[in-house]
Each structure stands twice: as C-alpha cells, then as structure tokens.
C-alpha cells in the first residue's frame, strides 16, 4: 500500500477543502432537499458524507486506482461519484471493463455513453472468452462451490467426494446438496460430462490481474454492496480491505442500501444501461451465467431484446440450464417458460 498522507503528516490542504466542498454540495442537494422524505434525506446525506470521506482517504493514499466497470448500476454510481465530485483523482484512475465474449449490446452501448458523458476512457480488457473456457473445462452449474466439487467428482480426483454423492453420509458438505442435485452429479459422472467454475478465473479475473500487474495498481475499486445479500454480503466486513500483495480493495458503495442508491440516481440524473431502463432487469451480472438463480428472467429479456445473444447463451450454457431443470435442482426453472412451451419442454424428460 502506498504511504498514507494522514499517517505521515503530509495531508494536503486541498484534500480538506475537497471534503468541505463535497459536504456543502451534498448538504444542499440532499439534506436541505424538501422534495425528499425527511428520513431519506438524512439517510442519503449520511451515506454520501461517509462515502466521500472514505473515498478521499483511500484515493489520497494510493497511486494507481483501478475502477471496475461492469456496465451495471453500481459501477454507474461509482463513476458518477468520482467524475462529478472528485475529478482531481481522475489522473490516477483506470476504468476497466472485462469483455467475456458474451456481453449485452446494451452494455457495450452504455460504455460508449459513459465515456461521452464523463469524458473518460474505459479500457476494454479481453482474455480467453467464456465460450473457449467452457468448451475446454466444462460448463458452470448450480453454484461456484458446487460446480467445483462436482467437477472434481466427475474427474475422480482425489477419491473425489464420492462419499457426498454416493454414500448416505451426513456432513456439512453433503448437506449442502439436495437429493436432486446429488442425482444430477451422479448423472454427470456416469456420462463423463465436465462441469467447472473455471470461466470466472480464466475469462474474468485473469485479464484484470494482468492489467493490475502491468500498471502497478495498488487500489482496486469495485461496486459490491452489502444490501445485495447472498454470499457477497458475508464475504466482507467493511468497505476497505488491505490486500496481501499490495493491492488493496475498496468498495465505495458497500454500506449503501437500495433506498440511498435510488435517491442518488434520481437526484444526479444518472442513466443506467438499457438492460435496466428498457429490458427491465434488476441486475446485469455475467450474461446467462447458470449460477444466477434468476437466469430465466435474463434469458426471457434476451429472447425479446437480444435474440442473437440468447442463441449464444443456449449454445454455451444450454446443457447446464436443461440439466438443472430436468433434475429439478432449483425451485425456479432456468429456461424461461416461453422457451419451454415453444420447444415442447416436458417436466420429465427435457426437450
Ligand atoms: S459469472 Fe458465471 S458465466 Fe461469468 S465467468 Fe463466472 S461462471 Fe462464467
């Protein structure tokens, strides 16, 4: 981590000015804004004040900052925050988007819109495509953790969790799989069908790590929020984490509830990508990822708005969706109802 100016007594005067200016600005816009509900005014002002103070602290104390751009609503809020209120840090910011090879056209268009609106450049990083990774290592299924375990079981290394899927043992790991999921695992093994979660590492993380190394990034800034829930909410205890290899992690929106994000969007006039504004999605995530519990909704939106992308997802992940549905692994089906009907999908035997 770069030396911290507050710690070594070098805190520059303009930093304090920025903090005061920011406080004044959000006071006018939020705290004194009569059009907002009173509780919401305080909540938003408080969240923004805290975020601004932390952002200044961390941006001051680091030299090369990577801001991950996903094209989703959280990264939109971070970009707006930095570009509008803290432009003095833009010289050390690297805005990076990883193209996995399966991206919404709406996301690609939105990146261009952001660049034009804020006058910044978003670096498009590209590693091995998801298509390549899935063909080489197998497709993702169920969840990251379960795909990893089943993948090893299918390959038979080392004794490969046979006891989870073939013996009636009760252990923490075994209890995480439902009976239909165990049936699915056995089916995959019997038929030698490879599954894996490798595309996260190969197609998403590798290009980012390569960029981090090449540009000596010492702060990685991402859009995770605790309010999103799930595993992510449990993965971090605060908005900042010191990294093991000199790359710290900062999540400016970590403490923002949905209400604050909604007020910020409306007040600042932020426009999200068409995935939200037109397709009606609530999250964008990784296109068609079978780990997504609501993947059927995303696929339905693709059928309506980006049919070529739907075909691509079916070609890459179709077997994963179909198998999870056939074995009744989830309460909600993966394949959208309109698709099941049009292809005569049956409860018992798939398509
Ligand atoms: S989120 Fe899903 S589709 Fe995207 S890279 Fe990871 S496993 Fe693959």
Image (spheres, rainbow, N blue to C red):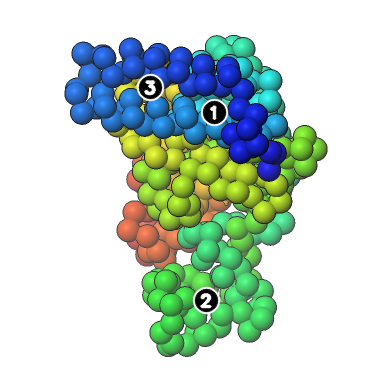
Q: Residue at x 43, y 72 (%)?
A: 177
Residue 347: image quadrant is bottom left
Q: Is mark 3 within 8 Å of ligand 1?
A: no
Quarter of the picture containing the N terminus is top right
Q: Which residue is mark 3?
A: 265
Measured as percent of width and height from the top left, residue 189 is found at: 59, 74
Q: Nearer the viewer, residue 288 or 188?
A: 288
Mark 2 neighbour density, 10 Å: few (under 14) some (14–19) many (20 or more):
some
Measured as percent of width and height from the top left, residue 146 is found at: 51, 66
Q: Is mark 2 within 8 Å of ligand 1?
A: no
Q: Which residue is mark 1?
A: 56
Q: Nearer the viewer, residue 229 or 110?
A: 229
Q: Is residue 130 visible?
A: no
Does 87 sit left or right of 345 as displayed? right
Q: Nearer the viewer, residue 238 or 226?
A: 238
**Earlier residue among tags 2 and 1:** 1
**Earlier residue among tags 2 and 3:** 2
Query: Of circles 1 and 3, which is in front?
Result: 1
Measured as percent of width and height from the top left, residue 75 is found at: 51, 30
Tell me the CA gap for discs 2 and 1: 53 Å
Residue 186's disc number? 2
Find numbered disc 1 in the image and state the secondary structure of the residue it sits on.
Answer: helix
Q: Nearer the viewer, residue 152 or 61?
A: 61
């Amino acid at each position: 981590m770069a030396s911290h100016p507050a710690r070594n007594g070098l805190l520059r005067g303009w930093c304090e000015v920025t903090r005061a200016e920011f406080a004044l600005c959000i006071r006018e816009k939020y705290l004194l804004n009569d059009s907002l509900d009173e509780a919401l005014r305080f909540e938003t002002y408080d969240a923004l004040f805290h975020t601004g103070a932390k952002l200044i602290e961390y941006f001051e104390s680091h030299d090369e900052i990577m801001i991950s751009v996903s094209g989703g609503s959280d990264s939109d809020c971070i970009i707006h925050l930095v570009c509008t209120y803290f432009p003095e840090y833009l010289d050390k910011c690297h805005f990076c988007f990883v193209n996995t090879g399966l991206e919404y056209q709406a996301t690609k268009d939105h990146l261009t819109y952001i660049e034009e609106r804020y006058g910044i450049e978003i670096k498009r990083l590209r590693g091995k495509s998801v298509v390549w990774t899935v063909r080489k290592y197998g497709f993702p299924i169920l969840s990251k953790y379960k795909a990893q375990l089943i993948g090893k079981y299918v390959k038979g290394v080392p004794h490969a969790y046979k006891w989870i899927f073939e013996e009636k043992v009760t252990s923490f790991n075994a209890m995480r799989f439902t009976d239909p999921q165990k049936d699915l695992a056995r089916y995959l093994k019997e038929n030698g069908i490879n599954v894996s979660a490798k595309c996260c590492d190969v197609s998403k993380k590798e290009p980012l790590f390569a960029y981090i190394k090449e540009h000596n990034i010492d702060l990685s800034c991402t859009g995770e929020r605790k309010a999103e829930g799930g595993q992510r909410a449990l993965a971090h205890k605060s908005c900042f984490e010191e990294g093991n290899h000199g790359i710290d992690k900062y999540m400016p929106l970590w403490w923002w509830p949905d209400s604050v994000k909604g007020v910020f969007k409306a007040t600042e006039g932020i426009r999200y990508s068409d995935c939200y504004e037109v397709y009606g999605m609530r999250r964008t995530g990784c296109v068609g990822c079978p780990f997504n519990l609501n993947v059927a909704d995303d696929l339905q939106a693709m059928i309506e708005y980006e049919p070529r992308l739907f075909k691509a997802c079916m070609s890459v992940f179709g077997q994963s969706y179909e198998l999870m549905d056939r074995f009744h692994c989830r309460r909600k089906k993966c394949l959208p109802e309109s698709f099941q009907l049009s292809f005569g999908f049956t409860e018992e035997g798939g398509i």
